[in-house]
Amino acid sequence: MRYVTNLPYETKEEEHVTIPMSDGVRLSAHIWRPTSSDQEPVPAVLEYIPYRKRDLTAVRDSIHHPYLAGHGYACVRVDLRGTGDSEGVLRDEYLEREQADAEEVLAWLAEQPWCDGGTGMMGISWGAFAALQVAARRPPSLKAIAIASFTDDRHSDDMHYMGGALLSDNLAEAGTMFAYGTCPPDPAVVGDRWREMWHERLENTEPWVLEWLRHQRRDDYWRHASVCEDYTGVQCPVLASSGWADGYSNAVTRLLGNLDVPRKGLIGPWSHKFPHLGEPGPAIGYLQELVRWWDHWLKGVDNGVMDGPMLQAWMQDSVPPSTSYEERPGRWVGEPDWPSPHIRPVTHPLTRHTIGPGQDATAKDTTVTAPEGGAAMTVRSPLSVGQFAGKWASYNAPPDLPYDQREEDGGSLVFDTEPLTEPVEILGSPSVELDLSVSEPVAMVAARLSDVSPDGAATRVSYGILNLTRRDSTEDPEPLEPGQRYRATIPLNGVAQAFPPGHRIRLSLSTSYWPLAWPAPKPALLSVHEHSSTLTLPVRPVEEPDEVPSSPFGEPEGTPPLAMTQVTPPEERWEVKRDLIDYRSELDIVKDRGTVRFEDIGLESGRRAHERYTAVADDFTSVGGETTWTMRFARDDWDVRVVTRTRLTCDETDFFVDATLDAYESDRRVFSRTWNEKVPRDLL
């Protein structure tokens, strides 16, 4: 990244500004703005998240907020209520109160003498969720949003329930927020009230995984703040981005296809990162793109920001399997609209061990209509299928992408094309339609698409999961009748991928994918009928023009990051373990940031997350997940620590949540609480 200091506007910053809410709670904001805004007001851009602006996101914030301020904007970073230095308690994600607070913040910003009355919202992950959800509420000052790594569907396309199957990231993210939501504010900011504010959080927090498990169907809990319920709510321009390695690769194209506002989409090879910090690379000059976006929509500059393709996507070249990449080779391609006129769905029948010749599903009289009654191919996958699946959403630290799929394929039904004689490129969401039967009333199918090189190495390209009880409805699931034939469609995550000549395209089907997804109560035998089961690929013909320059974006740049000293080293671990005496398997993940010192405020901070996922042999009720977090903050004689632990286990009928929350001052425990709860399984 290129760090720049010579910007068009001289800036100043206010590290702690309180914004009053209508119920008396005060939120804490960090504001960067042009010095000249005291005389010449500017638009305000809000980032609104719960991840502690004073310390845990301070370095990241220092790269992009001063940069945007230096281009003529008041950049405002607000801690949600109950987090960082804001008052109150954060009880769950995306609640009505959270969104009402955001509207009040925007109204407050629009009224400030240094703001010209126009506002925008930006962010990644929670910040992007917040911006999209608030946009659908149409606050009068909000003129545009720029969002990265988000979803418009909280139930089916978030870290909770993929295809109606419970994701282990449901537990992992709940553990993250259990820790973040119980940390204290900084006494240097809030004064002597810090302990009172801290204990209010400690006493009024419960593990969020409990609430998320109480809603296993798509109900009003998930419909709330899911913009896909009514796309017409969004009436402002949207710049949407994500990465193919992220868990949120699908919502960008859904917004492009469903919104009726000026919109642009951008999807790179990245994990869960802003595009200017993108890993795997190449990262891009995203902040320059933001300046152009805000200049057009907040200042009325006619700069051509809406020219060119609606979607720009990184077409990934073939690579060997690896859990991490510094760079993903490929090229940028553009699509004028979405759905794109360049892309043709090509449908392939599944025959014994092969993927049959494809037929263009859009061409007249060529849609595959294979007869019912093909021979049945069967699989009952072991729990070991999924140990090399990586994370639902890659963070690229520790290395967390899927590894070589050959061992996974040993417990799966596998269908290969013949070696390709010509290059094939896909862009969009593949899908699998199965004519199937199962031996249990509750069962799941995981479908994986892989690029198989001539030496046999298999790189996973995309995947999808379906809880078959939700095959027709995630609102009203129904048990399966063992032995009865059903049709079920499994959408796979969107991707742009090039398959070279000599390679094969592989579809693998399994009945388990642990620990990425929670298994069914019992192992199920899956029968798939050939000919009447199909794979459909969104083929982008290689002769289509790329529609974009070879290098459409500038070099990543930002302002110099905040000074920080690494006091103790970080630690990363991702270990798959198997004991062939008691048949216990384990995935052990450590993400320890070590201790860092923020030189400007004299604060030391440490974060350590430890996840463990275990199973014994093929006992589907033996699976368990555990997440433990330690958060520490220290300055002079102030030394506080929060330790949270959440464990999720099950039997055939219930989930069991055991959790603890402990808080310490100078190694003296000052708060402790334990939860032991049971939640019934609902066809899951």
Image: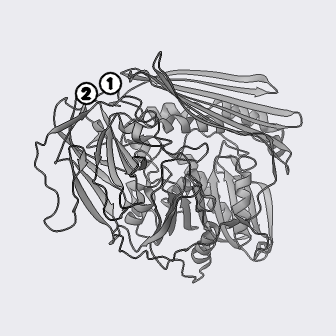
Res 112 seen here: no
What kind of residue is marked 2?
A: Glu
Residue located beneath label 1 in the image? 522
Circles 1 and 2, Cβ within 8 Å, touching? The answer is: yes
Label 2 sits on residue: 440
- How crowded pointer 1 is (Cα within 10 Å; few <14, some 14-19, many 20+) is rated as some
Q: Residue at x 41, y 49 (%)?
A: 455
Q: Position of residue 342 (x, y in %)?
A: 33, 71
Q: Nearer the viewer, residue 582 or 54?
A: 582
Q: Secondary structure at mark 2?
A: loop
Eyeballing the image, is 613 above or below 270? above
480 up-or-down from 335: above or below = above
404 displayed left or right of 665? left
Which residue occupies the extreme bottom position in the image? 302
Mark positioned earlier in the residue sequence (1 or 2):
2
Name the residue at 27% across, 54% down: 418
| Label 1 to label 2: alpha-carbon separation | 7 Å
Q: Is residue 621 above or below residue 480?
A: above
Residue 519 picture quarter: top left
Position of the C terminus by quadrant: top left
Neighbour tally class for label 2: few under 14, some 14-19, many 20 plus, Cα within 10 Å: some
Q: Amino acid at mark 1?
A: Lys
| Quarter in which the N terminus is drawn | bottom right
Instruction: Name the mark on residue 379.
Output: none
Residue at x 67% of width, y 31% of height = 202
Q: Is residue 211 above or below residue 659?
A: below
Q: Is residue 55 left or right of residue 405?
A: right
Q: Position of residue 160 (x, y in %)?
A: 45, 40
- Where does the image place residue 172, in percent across and percent down from the top left? 54, 36
Q: Secondary structure at mark 1?
A: loop
- Please report the residue visible at 62 percent of the width from the left and 68 percent of the height from the top: 285
